[in-house]
Image: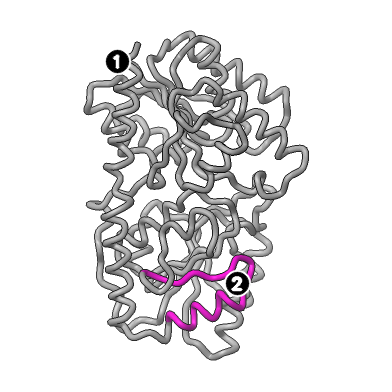
Amino acid sequence: MKILISINTSWNLVNFRSGLVQALVSQGYEVIAAAPWDGYVSEVTALGCRYVPLPMDNKGTNPVRDLALFWRYLHLMLCEQPDVFLGYTVKPNVYGSLAARFVRVPVINNVAGLGTVFQKGGWLNQLVIGLYRLALARSRRVFFQNAEDRQLFITGGLVDEGVSDRLPGSGVDLKKFSATPVPIGSTFRFLLIARMLWDKGVGEYVKAARLLRQRVVNADCCLLGFLDVENLSAISKQQMDEWIAEGVVRYLGVSDNVLEEITLAHCIVLPSFYREGTPRTLLEAAAMARPIITTDNVGCRDVVEDGVNGFLCRPRDAEDLADKMQKMVSLSSAEREAMGLRGREKVEREFDEKIVIDKYLEAIGEILKEG
C-alpha cells in the first residue's frame, strides 16, 4: 500500500514527522514524501521513503501560482496513485486535499496551528476559511493539535465533528529528548527557540531582557532560529544586528542540534501570540526537564501548567514576561529542578510521539479496511 505525505518544507518533515515516516515504512507501507527541495532532502530519503520535489510558494497568495500547485498535486496523484494522502500545513492541506478528492484518494489532514490569518480577519481570513471548508469537506480524518482549533473548525462548519480528532501536537521522541541535568556554575541562560517572527513574541523577549538588565538580574538571554525573510512578520537581519550590538540578547543562529542547545539552557521561553498548534520546542524542552515560560495563549498553555512546570505570562506584555523571568531566576536550583521533572512527567503522560503514530496507523488501517 502506498502513502503520499506532503508538507511545506523537507526540513519540516525531517524535524517533525520523521518518527511517523519511519513507523509507516516499518509497517510495510511504501511512503512518498512530496515537498519543496531544500538542504534536508538527503535526510528525508534516509528515513526510508521516496522523495518527490514539489515547488510551492509557501507564503504567497498569488492565485495563478496556487492553481499551478493544484495541477502539480493532481499530476502527482495520477502518477503515483496513492492509497492514502497525508496533508500537513496550509497549502498541502488545501490544494493537495482538493487534488486527492478529484481522483478519489482518501485524505487525512493535520491542522498544526492557524497562525496569524485567523487572528487578523479581513479578506485573506475569509479566503482561507473558504478554502479550508472546501478542501476538508470529504476528508476521512482531520487531526488538530489543540482543542481550541478543533472547536473553531467544528463550530465554523469547516469540518464535521465525526471525522475530527485531537493529537498531542506532533508528539516528542522521549528516548531522544531525555531528562538532562541543568548546567552548574554558569550564568543563568534563557533560550527562545523559534522562527524569528514578531508574532512569536521575539520583540517582547528583547524588551523583557532590557528590563532584567535594568533590574540588575544576571541572565543570558539567547535566541535560536531562522531569520525567516519570506514571512511578513519576519524580523530583519538589520534589526537583529541592532539588538546584538546593544548587547541585550545573543543570537545563536540556526542549529540542527536543538537538543544540545536545550541542554545548555536553564529555562526555555516562548512568548508567542501566534495561534500555535502545540509548539514542538516546548515539548522537547519539557521532555528534557527544563522549566518553561510561555504565554497564556492557544497551544502554548497546553504544555505548561502555571506554577507547576513553568510560568504563564500575558501575551504581548513584556513587563509581565520580565516578571516571570525574574521569578524563575529567583527560585532555588531545587525548585527549578522539581519544575523541570514535573514537565517531563507531563510529557510522558500526554505528549509521547507514540500516541501520534498509533492514531495515524489506526486511521490509515480503518481507511484501507473500508476500501
Point out the residue furthest to the right here: 123
Colour scheme of the picture? one colour
Q: What amino acid is labelled 2 in the image? A: Val
Q: What amino acid is labelled 1 in the image? A: Lys
Where does the magenta region start and end?
A: 309-328
At x 42% / y 12%, what residue is drawn? 80
Q: Nearer the viewer, residue 166 or 13?
A: 166
313 in the magenta segment: yes
* Marker disc for residue 369: 1
* Marker disc for residue 249: none
Q: Earlier in the sequence, mark 2 or mark 1?
A: 2
* Marker disc for residue 206: 2
The quadrant where residue 306 appears: bottom left
The quadrant where residue 60 appears: top right
Residue 20 vs 27, above or below: the answer is below
Per the image, label 1 sits on a secondary structure element best described as helix
Q: Residue 9: x and y, percent?
A: 50, 36
Tell me: 161 left or right of 19. Answer: right
